[in-house]
Image: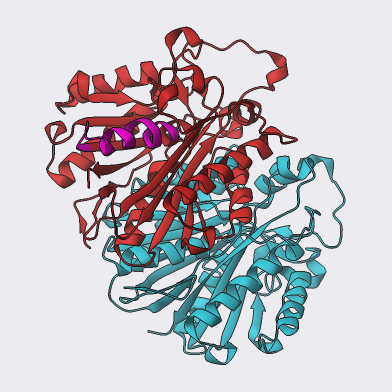
Chain colours: A red, B cyan
Amino acid sequence: MSRMGRQTFIYDNPPVIAAHRSVAGRKEGEGPLADWFDAILEDDLLGQKSWELAESEMVRRTARDTLDAAGLSAGSVDALLGGDLNNQIIATSFAAKKLGMPFIGLYGACSTFVEALALGAALISAGNLDSALCCASSHFCTAERQFRFPLELGTQRPPQASWTATACGCALLRSGGEGIRITSGTLGRVIDLNISDANHMGAAMAPAVFDTLAAHMEDTRRTADDYDLIVTGDLGWIGRDLLMELCHGAGLTMPEDKLVDCGASLYYREQDAHAGGSGCGCVASVSCAWIMKRIENGELNRVLLSGSGAMLSPTSSQQGQTIPGIAYAVALERG
Amino acid sequence: MSRMGRQTFIYDNPPVIAAHRSVAGRKEGEGPLADWFDAILEDDLLGQKSWELAESEMVRRTARDTLDAAGLSAGSVDALLGGDLNNQIIATSFAAKKLGMPFIGLYGACSTFVEALALGAALISAGNLDSALCCASSHFCTAERQFRFPLELGTQRPPQASWTATACGCALLRSGGEGIRITSGTLGRVIDLNISDANHMGAAMAPAVFDTLAAHMEDTRRTADDYDLIVTGDLGWIGRDLLMELCHGAGLTMPEDKLVDCGASLYYREQDAHAGGSGCGCVASVSCAWIMKRIENGELNRVLLSGSGAMLSPTSSQQGQTIPGIAYAVALERG
């Protein structure tokens, strides 16, 4: 396997997605993608004592369901790659403790799922790993109190705010067999166009998504024509419009009907999610549910999946810092 | 390149450490390793407005110094891998923004530097990257207010508490050339022996270090005899003793004089660091300064470097959760 271009890995031995599972919360389960999720939570607390433990249990269950779907035990999988939005990624690391396999902890904010796919695919293609679970999660109730305000305050949300999805997605990559192939992965750079409104994630991340999509197209000599869909993670309705503007301004062809954003697809407008869905679990669950299943059923052949993250913390926002964004991308192709 | 054993990567094309730099804070610069650091800060605030910006500036300077030492520009390095202890790893991601290269954000708490070396080496050995900067940092003042109490409270520290080092280490890995070779890397599992005292990091991490060292020895069919030194990150004096006990109890040979802990080496006992140094920057700076230089000057030929992290957050501690640990290891050999 050799690196090509400035940011893109081309996998000589493209790993396959042997199994994938998605779990969505109650609100997400009332949205337009309800029929696509593998499981919808009846109780967003999952019987736990805290929202953080609930999110961790959601990760564990999604990983276990993915293993079950592949007929594997946790002990036979080489590594878990993933993370979440919680400080010190406790939801994922506590789940990794229960799963017991080697763990590669990642932090790419809402880009984490695609970061995990790109790295996991590299390690499998090179023969370092035979199998890898890639996962990411988010939970509305852990994210609100950590990044914004305690839920109990009932703080009003501005129209440009996104809604952190309660959701988790997990994909099992293997070195051989049947399944969607991951053929390339593009790393992201940290891009900052000086957005400082911590309620305006779409604007903070759109420039990073543009940068990564442009790098992918340049590195692979592909255009939007080579993909049936270009899927972005968590830009929401406003961020998606901003990305279209950036593409048009730079002359990067991006047909309106080919660009699908997970955050702009997760909720109905009338569900009061304002700018759309966000959170590591948004792109993870939507891609594991809606996108991968449509590739498997033959509706889509080749998809470019990008996940983007806003690299802010409550501290950086309180200190008046602007919000840098990052985005990764992987190419998914029908096996 | 192929994976060997249950947790260890053997690098077919071992990358070299083409350059490395360490920066230490004032207190660390008054300790026993003062003469080994490449730079000692005169001002732990580095002229910035906040401790968080200071830590980020320390990362940027250490990375820049490493590039200068190798005669490279930021634009010619393929990726930056790293992280820190700040929520959402803002110190590293804000530095990555200024450096401008592709960024792979990691979170392994104080194990992050060795996690970065193990992954960076895998990506270079496989040809995905030609060069990678691996770095990790910590800052006493950002960590205290985030994990424990505001500095201004002057809270008394219990004797088992460690002192988060203000320090940063950065290593530039390349696919060829002169330098220390990274020949293998062992992933860690998340291990929890039910320590719940957030001031007792050494006890929380020692079982994970034991687990990873045992896996490394089993996977590579090596013993402590094969290494001139076994270097652990951030266990401190108490944690180092606990690791010795675990090794003896399990029959894993670990000669007393071969086990060196970075946290137990960074300060003099009379510097009031209690259990010793900790923080991502401790193992990063001590290994880039003291360990790598001793390999390069011929004093050491082969070193097993382990970094360990405690996967807790203030929230998980406040909720009464126990503290899982994780450890990674890499073998460093004279070129």
**Residue shown at 58% from the left, 55% from the top:** A99
Q: Can residue B53 be seen in this view?
A: no
In magenta stretch: residue A205: no
Q: In which quarter of the image is the C terminus of chain B?
A: bottom left
| Residue A123: image location, x then y, percent | 36, 61
* The image quarter in which residue B255 lies: bottom right
| Residue A93: image location, x then y, percent | 60, 50
Q: Compared with residue A220, is residue A270 higher up or lower down, i.e. above or below?
A: above
Q: Compared with residue B321, is residue A153 higher up or lower down, i.e. above or below?
A: above
Query: In this view of the protein, which residue sits in the foreground, B292 or B303?
Result: B303
Question: Majority secondary structure of the magenta segment?
Answer: helix
Q: Compared with residue B214, is residue B37 higher up or lower down, i.e. above or below?
A: above
Query: In this view of the protein, which residue sits in the foreground, B120 or A319?
Result: B120
Q: Quadrant of the N terminus of chain B?
A: bottom left
In magenta stretch: residue A286: yes
**Residue shown at 63% from the left, 31% from the top:** A142
Q: Is residue B280 visible?
A: yes
**Residue shown at 27% from the left, 74% from the top:** B176
Query: The magenta stretch spans which residues?
Result: A285-302
| Lateral position of residue B245 relative to residue B58, left or right | right
| Residue B10: image location, x then y, percent | 40, 76
Query: In this view of the protein, which residue sits in the foreground, A35 or A10?
Result: A35
| Residue A210: image location, x then y, percent | 27, 31
> Looking at the image, how many numbered discs can be counted on the residues?
0
> Residue lying farthest top?
A270
* The image quarter in which residue B71 lies: bottom left
Query: In this view of the protein, which residue sits in the foreground, A95 or B229?
Result: A95
| Lateral position of residue B77 relative to residue A61, left or right | left
**Residue shown at 55% from the left, 41% from the top:** B88
